[in-house]
Image (spheres, helix red, strand yellow):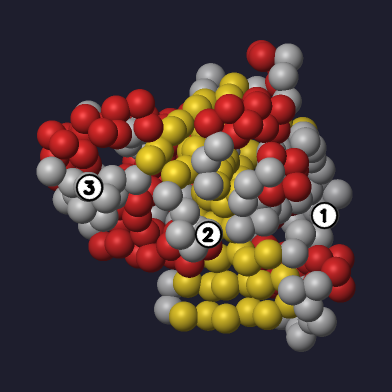
Amino acid sequence: MGILLLKITQIKVIFMENRTDLAVECFESAEKTKLDGVIVRENNAVTTVEVTNENGALALGKPKGKYVTLNVQSFVTDTNVFDERLNEFSSVLKTVLPKNAASVLVVGVGNENITADSLGPKTNDYVLATRHILPDLQKSLAADDLFNVATVTTGVLGETGIETAEIVKGIVRQISPDCVIAVDALAASSAERLGTTIQFSDSGISPGSGVGNHRDEISSTTVGVPVIAIGIPTVVSTGVISGDGSDTAFVTPREIDRITEQGAKLIGMGINVCLQKSLSVSDLSALVG
């Protein structure tokens, strides 16, 4: 990600506290020492951090659950993300989804008018929603095993006056999905993670927590069904660049438009590949336009 560092002077600045949303970075900041209640497994491009008890949650500052990091080729120079990464993404997502789930609500969290926060809304442009046409679609495609998928883009509290968690809870109560997949932009403490890392978690999500803008959490506790969180880091603390630990600003690279667009495409299509197993990538691409 050297190209990001070279161009980091052309940025937007958001003044917040120095935080990261990535569990793997929290573990690294503990100097990779053995921690009670934290299990770490590495397998090629995939790192799994499992927080198994309250001691581990306190040590990492993360709720109990599984956090899986998938390292991918940078989105900055990508022209096509429909490659082996779709299968890698699908395989990882399968490990955190509840077993026997047959319906899902995909929630695009964030502000589509702010590029660095638009990953969630953009992702829903690539997710195949089937709930409203499932019987007809199964018949026309001769595919009886299509997954029941609904999507929603929630907006942000400053625009809607409603907490994202409240919106999700209301929709879950109405349509009763087996689980929620919440997609949101993340904060990192390393510039090398921008546009090269995807984090999956089965512990839910607290929108804005990585940049100090804490909102109500979206989790099984608050919405009543399992919540899978997926995100890509789009901002990094300026303390990484300045070396000043008290520096509390966050910045985005000039290539943020490409990172969010390509990242959203990979996440959206990766969700489709994972859920709609009877359809090819070309079929899925045609259906979502």
Q: Position of residue 230 (x, y in %)?
A: 53, 50
Q: Which mark is residue 144?
A: 3
Q: Residue at x 34, y 45 (%)?
A: 147
Q: Position of residue 154 (x, y in %)?
A: 58, 25
Q: Is residue 101 above or below residue 183?
A: below
User: Looking at the image, how many numbered discs can be counted on the residues?
Assistant: 3
Q: Residue at x 69, y 48 (%)?
A: 220
Q: Which residue is mark 1?
A: 245
Check disc 3 and report its element: helix, strand or loop.
Answer: loop
Give me the C-alpha separation between circle 3 and circle 2: 21 Å
Q: Which residue is mark 2?
A: 98
Q: Which mark is residue 67?
A: none
Q: Residue furthest bottom?
A: 34
Q: Is residue 40 above or below residue 163?
A: below
Give me the C-alpha separation between circle 2 and circle 1: 39 Å
Q: Is residue 225 above or below residue 207?
A: below
Q: Position of residue 15 (x, y in %)?
A: 77, 33
Q: Residue at x 66, y 14 (%)?
A: 159
For the residue pair 30 and 283, the one nearer the viewer reads as: 283
For the residue pair 66 and 129, the one nearer the viewer reads as: 129
For the residue pair 191 and 259, the one nearer the viewer reads as: 259
Residue 16, image quadrant: top right
Q: Amino acid at mark 1?
A: Gly
Check disc 1 and report its element: helix, strand or loop.
Answer: loop
Tell me if label 3 and label 2 are in contact, CB under 8 Å: no
For the residue pair 18 and 152, the one nearer the viewer reads as: 152
Left or right relative to 207: residue 230? left
Q: Residues within 10 Å of mark 1 (few under 14, many from 20)?
A: few
Left or right relative to 188: residue 269? left
Q: Amino acid at mark 3?
A: Asp
